[in-house]
Image (spheres, helix red, strand yellow):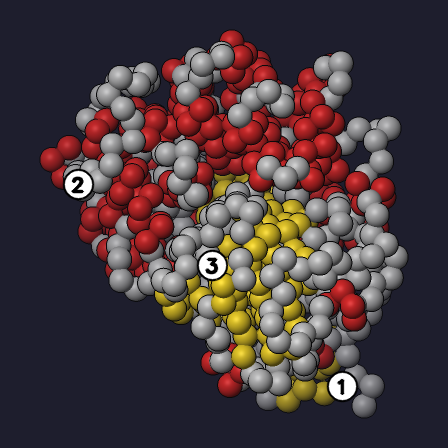
Amino acid sequence: MPLKPDSEDKNYTCVFFRNPFVIFWARYEKTTVMGACWCKDKAPDQREVYMPPLATAYHAAGEPRTRVIKVIDSIVVDRLVLEMLSLIASFVDNDEESPVPLVKLHVIADKEEGWIQVVTSLVNVIPLEDPLGPSAITIVFDDCPLPSKESVIKLTQLFRLSKQRAAEANLNVRMERNICVVLGCIAEKLAGPNSVAVLTEDTLDYMLTFLITQREPCIVLFALIALEKFAHTTENKLTIKKRLERETENPLLILEQMANSEDNMWRQVGFCAQWALDNMFTIEERKLSYETVDMSNINVILNSQDVSEYLKISCNGLEARCDSYSFESVRCTFQVDDGCWYYECVIVTPGVMQIGWATKNSHFLNHEGYGIGDDLYSLSYDGCRRLIWYKAKPSSITVIPEWQPGDVLGCLIDLDAREAIFSVNGHSLPPCREIFETTRQGFFAAASFMAFQQCRFNFGHEPFKHPPNRTFISFNEHGYLTEDQKKVVPRRIYLEQLRCSSVKEDSCTLCFDDTACCILEPCSHRGFCSLCTSQLKECPMCRAAILNVRREDT
Amino acid sequence: MAALPRRIIKETQRLMQEPVPGISAVPSETNARYFHVIVTGPEDSPFEGGLFKLELFLPEDYPMSAPKVRFITKIYHPNIDRLGRICLDILKDKWSPALQIRTVLLSIQALLSAPNPDDPLANDVAELWKVNESEAIRNAKEWTRRYAMDN
C-alpha cells in the first residue's frame, strides 16, 4: 500500500495536499497549527515575526522596487520568502522540519495589505535562476488565504500591468517572469466570476504582449501559462480566444513552432503553445497535433490512460509537462518482466522530477504529493535534489552535480541481476537492489513532475546518447501499439467520448461500471458488483456488518 | 488513474441537469474529478446573503473513500477552520459509498444552518460560540459580509 497521511485524523483529512513536501506540512499543522497558535488573540504582530538570517540579497540596492503600504518591514517578508525557497530545496525528510516561514507568510497574508505585501515580495525576490522559484510561488499561493478580487485589482494597478509595461525594452526579466507566475496562481485560485472580474483589459494586454519570439522565453512561457489558467473559466477563454484571433497571425501558431527547439526554454514555450492550441484555444481550420504527427517508428509512448489528471503529454506521447500544483505522474505503455532494459530521458527543466520505474501497484496520489519512488512498488531518481527515492525514503547522491537542462538521465533495469542503475550523462550511480526484494516483474518506465517541470523520453526510437555497457534491449524494439493506441487524444475529447457512453439498467449502483450481482447478508441489500463488494466492510445502505456475500445467480 | 468511472460521469450529469437549490457544483473543464462549488448561505443563519466558494475533489478510490472538500471563502464557523477544512462525520468515518456529491453538499449546507460548537474544529470560534453566542453570531455575520458578499 502507498503511504498515506493518517486519514483517520479529523484535523486534516480535508486539506488538499499538492506538493511533494506537503506531508510534512500536514504533520506540522496537526501538531501545531491546530493548537493555540492560530487563535485570534494571537494575531500577527511585528514583534512576533521570526527573522531568519538573510543568506543572499537577491535584489541589488539600486534596482527598482515596487513599494506598498507597510504593515511589516518588507525586508522581513523578503527574508521569509527566501527562507521558504531554501526550505523547499533542502526539504527531504517528512518528519524533521517545520515550515515556520510558510506559517508566518500565511499570517501576514491574512490581511489585504499583508497579502499584497507577500505577493510583492515574491515578485521582487524570487531569483530567476533558482529551478524551484516558480514552484515556490505556487506553494505560497496555495497556502495563503484566498485574495478578494479587490486585492487582486489593487495589485495589478500597483504593478501598473499594461501593454506599455510589457512592451518596455529594458524590463526586469525576473520581476516580469514572477508577475506572470503570480497571475497564473491568481487565475487558478479565483476560477469563476472573480477570475473574469480580475482579467481586466490592461492585465490581458500585459500577458498577450509577451507572446512574441523577440521576448525572453521565460517571460513568454509564464505569460502563456497564466493565460491558460485564466481560460479555465469559460468566459475568459472566449475573451482570450477572440483576442488571439484578432491578431494578423495567431501568436500561438508562431510559438508552437518552437516545440522541437534545441533551446530548452523555447522548447517549453512551444510545448505549452501546442498544448493550448489542442486543448484550450482551438482554431477551426487547424488540425489537432495528434492527427498530423508522424508516429511511424514509435512503438512505446507515455500512456495517456495511465496518468494523473493534470499532466500534459505531447502529441507524440514522448514528452510530458506539469503546470499544476499537484505532483503529477505517468507510466509508459510497455511492461517489462525479465531481461535487461534501458531508456533515456532528456531533462528539459532542472526542477524536481522523480523518474524511474513503477509497477501497476504504485498509485498516483498526486494531490497527496506522492509519486514514483514513494511506495514499495516504484523507484526513482530526482536529479534536482540528487536523491534516489524508494518507499518515500531518499538516499542522497553526492558524486554528480544537480541535473541541468539538456542532461540525459539513463534508466537501466536488469531483472535477471535484480538491479536498477540510474546514470546522468553516462555517469552511473550506485545500483539499487532493495525494490527487487518485494517486486520482480511488471515494471513500466514512469515519472512524477512538480509544477512547471518537463522532460522527454527516448524509449529507443532514436539512438541512445549514453548506452550502458552491458547487453540490453530497448522498449521500442519490442513494443507494439495499434493506430488507435498511438493517438494522444486531448483530454476534453476523451471526456466527451466518455460522457456519450450510456449506463446499463442492471449496473452496480456504486460504480455503474460492472453488473450488479451481489447480495449482502444478513441485511439483504443488493445492487453491487463483486469488485465494489470486495472493498466493503459494511453495507453502504444500512451500515450493517457484511457477514456473507451471495451471488444473485446462485 | 485509469479511465474515469461511470459513477462520476453520471453524478456530474445529474448535478448539471437537476442542480441542488442554493448550491452550484461545476466540474473543472480539464479535470472531471475537481469541482468548483458555490454554496449560498442558508436563510435565517448568520451566513445568509453570503456566497461561499468551496473546492471538491474526488480521490482516486472514490466512491470507496469520501470526496475531499474545503471552503475557499473564509468563514466564521465552529466546525470549519482557518484553512477551510470541515469537521463533518460523513466526510470521515461515517462515509458510505452510497452517499454522493449532492448529499455531501447538502450536509455542508445544513452544517451552516446548524453549527455544532460541541464538536469543534476551530477551537477559538467554538469557545466563543459556547460562552457568548450572540457575539459569535455577530462575528459570523461580519465575516460573511466581509468575505462572502461581492461588493
Sequence-wise, which precedes: disc 2 or disc 3? 2
Q: Vertical placement of A109 versus A424: above or below?
A: above
Residue A4 at least partly seen: no
Q: Earlier in the sequence, mark 2 or mark 1?
A: 2
Query: What's under tag 1, amino acid-wise?
Result: Arg
Mark 2 on the same chain as mark 3: yes
Please give left or right for residue B85 compared with residue A221 in the image: left
Q: Where, by quadrant of the figure, is residue A258 drawn?
A: top right
Mark 3, chain letter? A
Q: Residues within 10 Å of mark 1 (few under 14, many from 20)?
A: few
Question: Label 3, on which residue?
Answer: A382
Q: Quadrant of the N terminus of chain B?
A: bottom right
Residue occupying the point 42% across, 53% down: A402
Indicate the amino acid at tag 3: Asp
Question: Is A496 situated left or right of A389 in this image?
Answer: right
Q: Secondary structure at mark 3?
A: strand
Residue depicted at x 35% and y 49%: A88
Q: CA distance from mark 2 to mark 3?
A: 28 Å
**Residue A113 seen in the current view:** yes
At x 21% / y 29%, what residue is drawn?
A75
Q: Which mark is residue A53?
A: 2
Q: Give the Cα separation between the discs numbered 1 and 3.
A: 48 Å
B126 w.r.t. A416: above or below: above
- Given this view, does label 2 or label 3 mark the residue nearer the observer? 3
- Whether label 1 touches label 3, CB < 8 Å: no
Q: Are marks 1 and 3 on the same chain?
A: yes
Residue at the disc numbered 1: A551
Q: Quadrant of the C terminus of chain B?
A: top left
